[in-house]
Image (tube, rainbow, N blue to C red):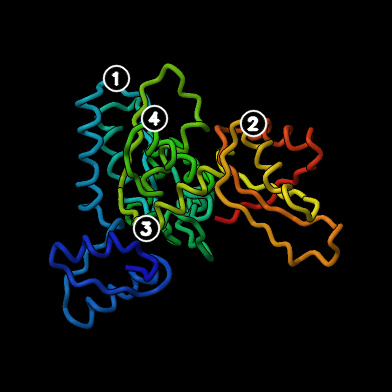
Amino acid sequence: MPTTTPLIKVNRTKSYGAEVVLYGNVYDEACAKAYELAEEHGYTFIHPFDDLTVATGQGSIAMEIVKELPLVDYILVPIGGGGLATGVSTLAKLLNPKIKVIGVEPQGANCMQASLKAGKVTTLPTVNTIADGTAVKTPGSKIFPYIQKNLDDIITVPDEDLVVAFLDMVENHKMIVENSGLLTVAALKYLDVKNKKVVSILSGGNMDVITMSSVVQQGLIFRDRIFTVSVLLPDKPGELSRVAGVIADVNGNVIKLEHNQFVSTNRSAAVELRITLEAFGTTHKNEIIEALNKNGYQPKVVRTMM
């Protein structure tokens, strides 16, 4: 596995009795090392996605979907190297050619989209995405013809959409889904699927607590539920209390204050106060900013650092 693999995935793999070797920064480097070890020690090498037998097994998901929802219109499937998408799209088309199978990749690791556009397997120079489970530079060459034949389209989504999708899944569905598994949920806003029967495959839940906390915070920031403003206060007693009162009057909740009198060289000069606030959303955020403006604080929204 790459050295960037979440700890929870490493530990769960070890719990099945496997020896885990961490190597490289991305999947492709780890895969090359695994092949090298197999050659050196005589291990059996099973490719995680560029193997038709593996893809066939993953295709059984399509069978379950069609059995549970015979009239399904769309199946959305995450793509890293393409094994899951190969199995699902191939079997779905065999069961019902009318089913639209849409692959979803991170914008920062869209190797399959690049390959389809080029008409051949293409290697990306780099990958950069929070969806570590689909951070692949080169898709499978054995499964590529099946993708060309059976996949109807590919959508790419930015990391920001994955962050917001994670927050939605936690708050609305009480589910922990890793970023790669959330690709299909994040892609829904780019499709016109109103009144259609849609299945989004959520392909994993390997997310450690530290990453989870970071993603939740970023999701709250993207949704304007947490934001930071900078205001200038006269350097005299009572000013901090007064600005806090203005915020409280519009139901703003202060999370963090950064107030340093020592940066002022003149007792009559203004001192910067950075306030990190919790709001109900964009409308409430704007109400808080308007209240601060009305009271003469001229707030500036700045980057939130948690």
Q: Is disc 3 in contact with disc 2, using a CB cutoff of under 8 Å?
A: no
| Residue identifier under label 4 | 100
Task: Give the CA distance from mark 4 to mark 1.
Answer: 11 Å
User: Which of pointers 2 and 1 indicates the residue nearer the eye?
Assistant: 2
At 24% from the left and 42% from the top, the residue drawn is 59
User: Which of pointers 3 and 1 indicates the residue nearer the eye?
Assistant: 1
Residue 170 in percent (x, y) is at 37, 39
User: How would you rate the neighbour count of disc 2 (Cα within 10 Å): few for under 14, some for 14-19, many for 20 or more?
Assistant: few
| Residue identifier under label 1 | 71
At 42% from the left and 42% from the top, the residue drawn is 166
At 52% from the left and 52% from the top, the residue drawn is 114
Task: Give the CA distance from mark 3 to mark 1.
Answer: 32 Å
Q: Which quarter of the picture shows residue 296?
A: top right
Type of residue at label 4?
Lys
| Residue identifier under label 3 | 141
- Which numbered disc flags the more N-terminal residue, 3 or 2? 3
User: Which residue reaches farthest front?
Assistant: 237
| Residue identifier under label 2 | 249
Residue 111 in percent (x, y) is at 47, 55
Q: Which mark, residue 79?
A: none
Q: Is disc 2 in contact with disc 4, using a CB cutoff of under 8 Å?
A: no
User: Which of pointers 3 and 2 indicates the residue nearer the eye?
Assistant: 2
* Along the line of sight, the residue nearer the viewer: 218 or 149: 218
Q: Describe the element under mark 3 as helix, strand or loop.
A: loop
Question: Can residue 89 be seen at all in this image of the molecule?
Answer: no
User: Which of pointers 4 and 3 indicates the residue nearer the eye?
Assistant: 4
Type of residue at label 3?
Ser
- Which numbered disc flags the more N-terminal residue, 3 or 1? 1
Type of residue at label 1?
Leu
- Which numbered disc flags the more N-terminal residue, 4 or 1? 1
